[in-house]
Amino acid sequence: MKPKTIIMAVLSANGIVALSHDDPVDWTSTEDRKLFKEVTLDAGIIIMGRKTYEMIGKPLHGRLNVVITRYPENHTDSKDLRFTSKQPRKLLELLHESGFSKVVIAGGPSVFSQFLNQQLVDEIYLTVMPVFFHSGLSLAPSLEQTVPLSLEEVKEISSNALLLHYLVRSDHD
Ligand SMILES: NC(=O)c1ccc[n+]([C@@H]2O[C@H](COP(=O)([O-])OP(=O)(O)OC[C@H]3O[C@@H](n4cnc5c(N)ncnc54)[C@H](OP(=O)(O)O)[C@@H]3O)[C@@H](O)[C@H]2O)c1
């Protein structure tokens, strides 16, 4: 068993989620940050790659922050912060056993790719920002298969940004 697994990402209108591996993503909006906070506080947990954690710079308050790294021994856990080298499926199973019914995958692209490739994702929230970037990282650069989606909701979260809420279809191949 695993918890409901939700990807949350913000991207440019031409599909870029980061200008580089150390982009602080300061081109997102207040409304997107607010939505991220709401959904992640509701889940009580976010899972992210080590580079994304370093970009955020500190654990996000009120949620368990689970950081995936090959070298958890090089980091120090604290109340709301766990470093783990557990692989996605095993990690979700353990979190389910610990009582989490919902988790948010907060990126980055390498982590998004792995959870999608292992068919572990149930929902995706994408905030589309009104900008094209000339280069950068796509949401799931190492995707190995097609992921069929159904559109659950479209919302204008500000005069300039659109939220797309998708469900991953079960005919996932
Ligand atoms: N626009 C958005 O919504 C969004 C969301 C999140 C992040 N970002 C941006 O994306 C960029 C970072 O993304 P990224 O793909 O370069 O890096 P990332 O996914 O944040 O982190 C990659 C690191 O995670 C660890 N890792 C990943 N998979 C692992 C596995 N299976 N087992 C063990 N460790 C694993 C490794 O850490 P070690 O090297 O420590 O082993 C790896 O170097 C940043 O610019 C960030 O700001 C954008």
Image (cartoon, helix red, strand yellow):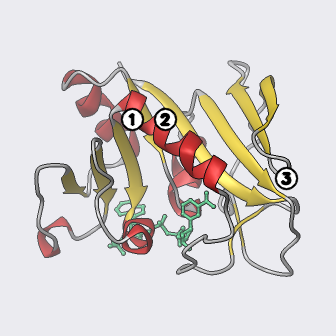
| Residue 173 visible, this angle | no
Image vertical order of residue 71 relative to residue 43, above or below: below
Q: Nearer the viewer, mark 3 or mark 1?
A: 3
User: Which of 89 and 36 lies nearest the eye of the viewer?
Assistant: 36
**Percent x, y for residue 21?**
56, 79
Circles 2, 3 touching at the beta carbon (< 8 Å) = no
Report crowding for label 1: few under 14, some 14 to 19, many 20 or more residues within 10 A (C-alpha): some
> Where residue 104 appears, x then y in whole percent?
46, 39
Three-letter code for the amino acid on which mark 2 is drawn: Glu
Which of disc 1 and disc 3 is earlier in sequence? 1
Q: Position of residue 131 (x, y in %)?
A: 86, 67
Residue named by callout 1 = 41
Q: Does the rendering let one see residue 46? A: yes
CA gap between label 2 and label 3 equals: 20 Å
Q: How far apart are the two marked residues, 1 and 2, measured between alpha carbons?
A: 5 Å
Q: Earlier in the sequence, mark 2 or mark 3?
A: 2
Q: Quadrant of the N terminus?
A: top left
Indicate the secondary structure of the residue bearing disc 2: helix
Quadrant of the image containing the C terminus? top right
Mark 1 vs 2: CB contact within 8 A: yes
Work out how far the residue at label 3 is from the one at label 1, CA to CA, in angstroms: 25 Å
Q: Which residue is mark 2?
A: 38
Mark 3, residue position: 160
